[in-house]
């Protein structure tokens, strides 16, 4: 479908993440299939009406019994498509404009509790021990992977912020240190202090990091590739270590959320947490004081019958 290809090209031009582009495309395809089956006509952008969007919303809720988050995600993808089509003159009016999202309670962020953090730490240590025994020529890459995961967990940096770091952005010693994020979200620069765990992770990696002209902190080991590691390769590493720790859905953002939640649990104020995470709005930081499903389960488990 040519319109889908043009829409995908537009999303890529907006620097949308690959997973976001893939998800939007999938959501639009599912709506197109529903549209054709329901109306008995070929899907076209001018053919979509506000009634179609409202009926699709109801279909997802009542027939497919989808969660509010899933319905809202699909409606959001459709809204982006129609907004783009309106802007480019493909349609005269956005049919999603007056369609309400499904109200839902905020679930709170996904993060690792203390037990899960301990399990991840043990998985990292085991991976390093085994790699030194079995992969004497490749264990340095495992050290890099271990150090990077620990670094993310103790700095709360977005993955791309960490991968964009250069040696010149790093200042640290035995007792303190910091990294400077040159281009955070919105192009903002910020400095993030390094605690003892983050400093040790960096020291362990820098002690074995290949020398050369590559100025990025996190670099490839097996080849002379210039530039930083790719985010995709790091995501695979995090997924692998997460699976080893019994955390099959571990992502870089879960590590970031864990850092934020740990700060809140330690009594750090929202303003400081926002500054460390690079949030422009305190409302974004408030998610860390919103209970997630794990918090609710723990609260219920504390009930006793007397």
Image (cartoon, grey):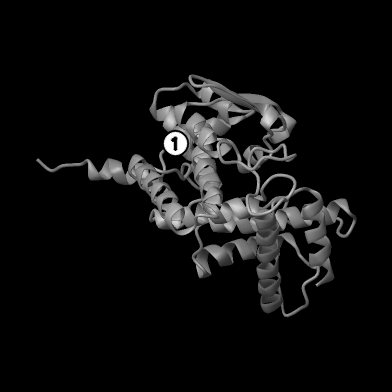
Question: In this orientation, which residue lies closer to the viewer: 67 or 294?
Answer: 294
* Residue at the disc numbered 1: 290
Indicate the position of residue 61 as horizontal and vertical percent values: 53, 62
Classify mark 1: residues with Cα within 10 Å, few (<14), some (14-19) or many (20+). Answer: some
Q: Is residue 198 above or below residue 236?
A: above
Question: In this orientation, which residue lies closer to the viewer: 45 or 3?
Answer: 3
Name the quadrant of the N terminus.
bottom right
Q: Can I make out residue 181 in this image?
A: no
Residue at x-position 9% and y-position 40%: 306
Indicate the position of residue 254 as horizontal and vertical percent values: 50, 45
Tell me: 22 left or right of 62.
right
Question: In this orientation, which residue lies closer to the viewer: 205 or 112?
Answer: 205
Q: Can I make out residue 274 in this image?
A: yes
Residue at x-position 71% and y-position 63%: 25
Question: In this orientation, which residue lies closer to the viewer: 80 or 198?
Answer: 198
Residue at x-position 69% and y-position 56%: 18
Residue at x-position 65% and y-position 57%: 19
């Amino acid at each position: 479908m040519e319109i889908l290809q043009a829409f995908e090209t537009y999303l890529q031009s907006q620097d949308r993440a690959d997973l976001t582009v893939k998800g939007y495309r999938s959501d639009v395809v599912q709506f197109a299939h529903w549209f054709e089956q329901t109306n008995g006509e070929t899907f076209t952008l001018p053919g979509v009406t506000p009634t179609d969007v409202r009926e699709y919303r109801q279909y997802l809720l009542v027939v497919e019994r989808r969660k509010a988050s899933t319905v809202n995600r699909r409606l959001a993808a459709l809204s982006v498509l129609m907004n783009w089509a309106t802007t480019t003159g493909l349609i005269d009016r956005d049919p999603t404009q007056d369609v309400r999202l499904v109200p839902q309670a905020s679930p709170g962020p996904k993060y690792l509790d203390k037990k899960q953090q301990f399990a991840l730490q043990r998985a990292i240590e085991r991976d390093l021990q085994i790699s030194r025994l079995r992969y004497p020529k490749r264990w340095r890459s495992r050290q890099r992977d271990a150090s990077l995961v620990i670094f993310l967990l103790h700095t709360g940096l977005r993955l791309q912020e960490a991968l964009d770091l250069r040696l010149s952005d790093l200042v640290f010693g035995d007792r303190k240190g910091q990294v400077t994020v040159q281009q955070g979200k919105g192009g903002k620069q910020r400095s993030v202090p390094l605690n003892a765990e983050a400093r040790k992770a960096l020291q362990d990696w820098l002690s074995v990091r290949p020398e050369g002209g590559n100025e990025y902190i996190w670099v490839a080991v097996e080849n002379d590739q210039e530039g930083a590691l790719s985010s995709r390769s790091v995501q695979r590493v995090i997924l692998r270590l997460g699976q080893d720790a019994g955390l099959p859905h571990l992502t870089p953002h879960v590590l970031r959320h864990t850092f934020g939640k740990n700060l809140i649990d330690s009594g750090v104020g929202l303003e400081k947490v926002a500054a460390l995470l690079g949030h422009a709005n305190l409302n974004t930081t408030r998610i860390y004081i919103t209970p997630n499903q794990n918090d609710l389960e723990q609260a219920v488990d504390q009930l006793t019958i007397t």
